[in-house]
Amino acid sequence: MKHRIKVDEWEQRTRTPLLLLAACFALAYAVPVLTPDAPAWIHTACRAVEWAVWAAFAGDYATRLLLTPDRGAFVRRHPLDLLAVALPLIQPLRLLRLVSTLLLLGRRARNAPQITLTVYVAGSVVGLLMFGSLAVLQVERDAPDGNIRTIGDAVWWSFTTMTTVGYGDLAPTTGLGRLLAVGLMLSGIALLGVVTANIAAWFISRFERDNAEEMRQTALLEALTLEVAALRAEMADLARTSQSAAREVPEPSPPTRP
């Protein structure tokens, strides 16, 4: 129990810093994609920021692992966290660092309360839309048969893909681009399911609160009704008792004359 409290305290303390680091990662990921002709030192600095953010998330995972007494159970319960930390080491691609960051942020959403979960879901939608657009633009911009050449086309394609509309006016032609499309479609379906479930849970909780309040008021009215009935019965008994006592009192005899 003590170790569980330590892990919870660590996650509470690191939630905001990790989100800020994720925002830095987003900026470092976007700059080279949007400005491919930027000086080499900018690309180098962005790669350094990406690796620094990944290292921070890896350190977070290692710290939580050390704070947990049963480390084997922790690894089994958090397979996506381990995968997210290991992916960039297996193949140092920028796209895999993007996947690892999204996976580790997703862990925060799973542990969040309902209102915070809504914020996380909204942030996930925006993040997936942005990252999906940048990633598909990066892999499709120089493809011979590609038709996604600008960031506007990429955002439009990501939006129609995440919502599973798929107008077909824009489509990836490379293998990696199609793999991104599959990921966006599955993510869009999952996020829509989370949003629907969260809204339904909010309505159900609201109805349950209203129903509980109505039942409480009904129980209170029933208790008051019983109390009033008991008071009426007690008053009736008192009235009958006073009438009986009045009849039993003997009338005073007249005074005798001398």
Image (cartoon, rainbow, N blue to C red):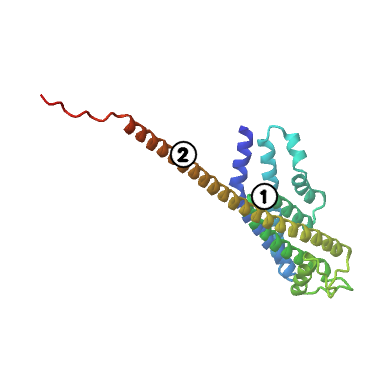
Report which residue position mark 2 lands on. Answer: 230
Identified at 74% across, 67% down, the residue is 33
Q: How many numbered circles are shown?
A: 2
Task: Give percent across and percent down for residue 156.
Answer: 76, 72
Identified at 33% across, 32% down, the residue is 247
Mark 1 burial class by Cα count in 10 Å: few <14, some 14-19, many 20+: some
Q: Is 187 situated left or right of 209 in this image?
A: right
Report which residue position mark 1 lands on. Answer: 108
Q: Earlier in the sequence, mark 2 or mark 1?
A: 1
* Closer to us: 176 or 209: 209
Identified at 68% across, 51% down, the residue is 109
Task: Give percent across and percent down for residue 121.
Answer: 68, 57
Q: Is 208 situated left or right of 239 in this image?
A: right
In the image, farthest residue toward the left: 258
The answer to whether residue 191 is above or below residue 107 is below
The answer to whether residue 81 is above or below residue 25 is above
For numbered disc 1, what is the local secondary structure? Answer: helix
Mark toward the viewer: 2 or 1: 2
For numbered disc 2, what is the local secondary structure? Answer: helix
Q: Check the picture and name the quadrant holding the C terminus.
A: top left
Residue 170 location, quadrant: bottom right
Q: What's the residue type where badge 2 is placed? A: Ala
Asked if marks 2 and 1 touch (Cβ < 8 Å), the reply is no
Task: Give percent across and percent down for residue 209.
Answer: 59, 51
